[in-house]
Amino acid sequence: MTMKPAIPGQRQSAFDPFLWGGMLLIGAVLAWLSIARYLGYNAGMLDLGNMAQAIGSVLRGQPLIFTFHQGATSRLAYHVELIYFLLALPYALWPDPRLLLMIQAVLFVLGAIPVYRIALRRTRSHFAARSLALIYLFYPTAQTSVLFDFHGDTLGMPLLLFALDALDERVWWRYGLFVALALSTKFYVALVLVLLGPLIWWYYRERQVALITTAVGLLYGIVAFFVIRPLFTTASTSEVHQGLNYITFYFGQLQLVLNDWLPRLIHSLVVFGPAMLLAWRGWPWLLPGLPIAAAMLISTAPGPAYDYRYHHYALVVPFIVMAAIEGTVRLQQRSQTATGRRRNWRGPVGLTLGIVILSSALLVDTPMNVLFWRSPPGWGLDSSVYGITPRDAAKDAFLAAHVPDDADLAASTFVATHLTNRDTLYLVRYADERAAELFAEHLQQVDGVVADALFDYRVFDGGDFLGGSSYEQQAIGMLLQHPEFGLVAARDGLLWFERGATETERLTQTWTYRDYAVAPTPLATFDDRLVLYEAQLEPLGDRRWQAEFVWGWHDSATSESREGPGYVAVSTLEGVDHERIVHLPTFAMLPTPAWPADAYIVEQFVVELSPDIPAGEYQWQVSWYDLRHSEAYATDERSRVGDVFPIGTITVQ
């Protein structure tokens, strides 16, 4: 294939205000959204938290150690992300997951520079170079990779483009450097290099470079998979990542692939389709990335892994872009050699850019998407995506006030991501059928637990939802009855349990049955489902109160209303926000589905009011909320059962 000569002054070709303006805009938006997701407690331990803990472990002299449900293990036993050792250097200056998110967003947009340089060098057109750089910046799968937590292969995406730019320019030391960096992001970049070698031989006629590239990829892949991974595999390494179990885990249920072939096909169209008007003309450049894409499309890992919204296709993007560049070159050549009417090659380039931008606006959750602003559940400024609520600020304050910096912990899934600078960090609940058993094991290894009785993250799966207020209900019940742990702090549903807490430190929570010779008169009924018979509030001093409530089922309550996850009672002080008091005995120790139909349930609990509440008189109110409702965590009229009932007035000193 005949290559076009380089443009004079090509080393300064990337200094284009249009290019840098696009990079700054896209980079700022992606960084803002990534950080907003973190600040809103919507970025979980899987995977941002795990990566942050692993990188932070290097500062403690450990080889990328993080806590998985089986114990402490190394990232080197998983995907061999050696690049994380380099990231430990800036992380030492600011050990915060937000730094990783910013690095990822910045590195991604810097990938537009090699795209621009290659395109300008090959086409000698600023229009083409700008358009192709924007195609990269707006490419849907590229943006979703950046927005989904933090991953090595997302870092590998721009690094591969820098390597391809050096290859195209034949600057071999720079090519070698970026190949090495790309390999360090994940071990399966080796497969990309193995297939890149033959393309280099055919396209650039660089036989020696081609052979070295393939050999390096093959050798590194073998060493990483069969030497480094086993070397760091321990009894705590997840079984699915031990040895060849990795292959079985990701590709062991082919019948499942056949069963849902249609959604997999649709996701493949999302991955490749937006640029295909140009890319099909440069199809050989798609080959190095095809095995990665194919592996994801037939993967049976949870997620589902084939979903374009994850990071799994990040390493495919550089080759889609390279195919688009080659397609543009061929259109140019065709227009120049055409006899008769000269064809305009700019039209397909501009149209492809338009398709990519439109696809991004429709498929990626950014301000370009109308759903971002409408914010239905699961989109945009919804509290489970990018929305930052006042309760998130309350979480920050709660963690700062109560959780020791060096304590070994178990923590709520999205709270844990804010507590990664420690050796041991389990989750209160793992998405595992053995969740309760695992939690019991982990309690033996931790000093404290942060749980959330108003778990405010939920995702929708068809007509059902995952998460919601009852997500950690079982674990909280286990903690309240564990002899070695005591509840020592509670604020707006957030709970801090400490090992070895003294009786005076504990916020005691108990329940019992009560017998009456004569049935008591109800104080209040809640939608003919629940009945309040008695309520007492006793001041204990130091802003502590002991509350006692007597509850029962209403005679009209149906068996259907008594089943399911049940209900949660929440007390509030009128006019005071984000100081909700969850009635833990009837939420987690004896949940309403366990109540006998004709029993009187007495719950007693101690609550310590926040010092942020000004002194004065407040009306204490109580209400019930249906845990079957996805928005029960918000404790508003959407999930409320009946009306709010005023108990009485208390004086806060």
Image (spheres, grey):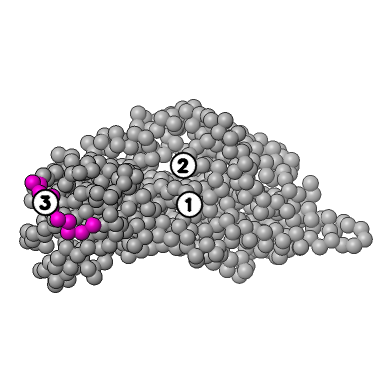
Q: Is residue 454 above or below residue 75?
A: below
Q: Indicate yes or no whether the magenta region holds residue 445.
A: no
Q: Name the mark on residue 505.
A: 3
Horizontal placement of 366 versus 472: left or right?
A: right
Residue 3 vs residue 623: left or right? right
Q: Which residue is mark 1?
A: 148
Q: Nearer the viewer, mark 2 or mark 3?
A: 3
Real-space Cα distance between discs 3 and 1?
40 Å
As measured in the structure, the alpha-carbon distance from the residue carrying label 2 to the one carrying label 1 is 17 Å
Q: Is residue 230 above or below residue 168?
A: above
Q: Is residue 97 visible?
A: no
* Amino acid type of the residue that numbered disc 2 sits on in the rendered structure: Glu
Residues rendered magenta in the picture: 516-525
Residue 48 coordinates in the image, percent (x, y): 41, 49
Residue 83 percent location from the top left of the image: 46, 45
What's the residue at 24%, 70% (across, down)? 575
